[in-house]
Amino acid sequence: MIDIQHNINATHQRIKQASVQQGVEPPILLAISKTRPASDIVVAFEAGVRHFGENYLQEALEKIAALEGYPIEWHFTGPIQSNKTRAVAENFSWIHTLDRNKIARRLNEQRPEKLGKLKVCLQVNVDREESKSGLLPERVAELAEEVSLLPNLELKGLMAIPQAGAKDAPRKKSFQTLARMLAELKKIHPQMDVLSMGMSGDLELAIAEGATIVRVGTAVFGQRIKKP
Ligand SMILES: *Cc1c(COP(=O)(O)O)cnc(C)c1O
């Protein structure tokens, strides 16, 4: 049995310790609940988590419907294609994976006014990996400018997933690169203050470089349930 409540307490403890050590505000814990049932989300909610991230749209919509009435902030953290924009615009508070102007324009058009602005992080392919989603660093300023002009989107910050399997030193460098990019963008877009970086294995490293949202899956819910 996975003890989700215990895992959340332990994760909050890790976040707190790293934040105190660095003398920074603790980041938000975004629990990545992909492949986990709604009942696991309820346990995490009762342990104090309010932000949940989902990668697979169909699965997410079922859980969002099942948990209607819970004051949860839903974050979309998966790859986004044109045919998914409407459901994301209508059901989520945040998207962390925006990397194309066409998708931005669709989200802006499809966002219901009564929900307020959709909060957006631009995903950056910070390690310049082939076949990885996200913008190359030199393309980020342009998309930030375009998103900032769309009235139903709120440009919040940057998100990155460092290269899988990378050691601490290159990982730290990737987080530093993202933090430096945000600092640059802030000169033009002062409202940008979110760095979505750090996962189960490296959240301390990310906090040391200024993470304001850490996205944690397995450390909270245990190993993911395999998709068929
Ligand atoms: C699955 C996922 C995570 C969580 O990863 P863990 O290593 O399980 O903590 C974080 N961010 C994104 C975008 C993910 O898809």
Image (cartoon, rainbow, N blue to C red):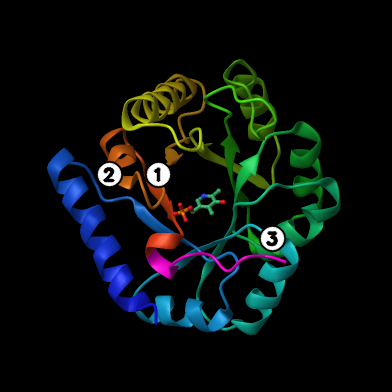
Label 3: which secondary element: loop
Residue 51 image point, x, y percent = 47, 64
Q: Residue at x 20, y 55 (%)?
A: 16
Contact? badges 1 and 2 (CB < 8 Å) = yes
Sooner in the amino-acid sequence: mark 1 or mark 3: 3
To which quarter of the image does residue 63 belong? bottom right
Q: Which residue is mark 2?
A: 204
Q: Which residue is mark 3?
A: 56
* Extent of the magenta region: 220-228
Q: Which residue is mark 1?
A: 198
How busy is the neighbourhood of tag 3: few (under 14 within 10 Å), some, or many (20 plus)? some
Is residue 79 placed above or below 168 in the rendered structure? below
How busy is the neighbourhood of tag 2: few (under 14 within 10 Å), some, or many (20 plus)? many
> Alpha carbon of mark 1 to alpha carbon of mark 2: how far?
7 Å
Sooner in the amino-acid sequence: mark 3 or mark 2: 3
Q: Amino acid at mark 1?
A: Gly
Left or right, 181 with respect to 99, comes to left
Contact? badges 1 and 3 (CB < 8 Å) = no
Q: Residue at x 21, y 42 (%)?
A: 24
Q: Residue at x 41, y 49 (%)?
A: 199
Residue 224 image point, x, y percent = 53, 65
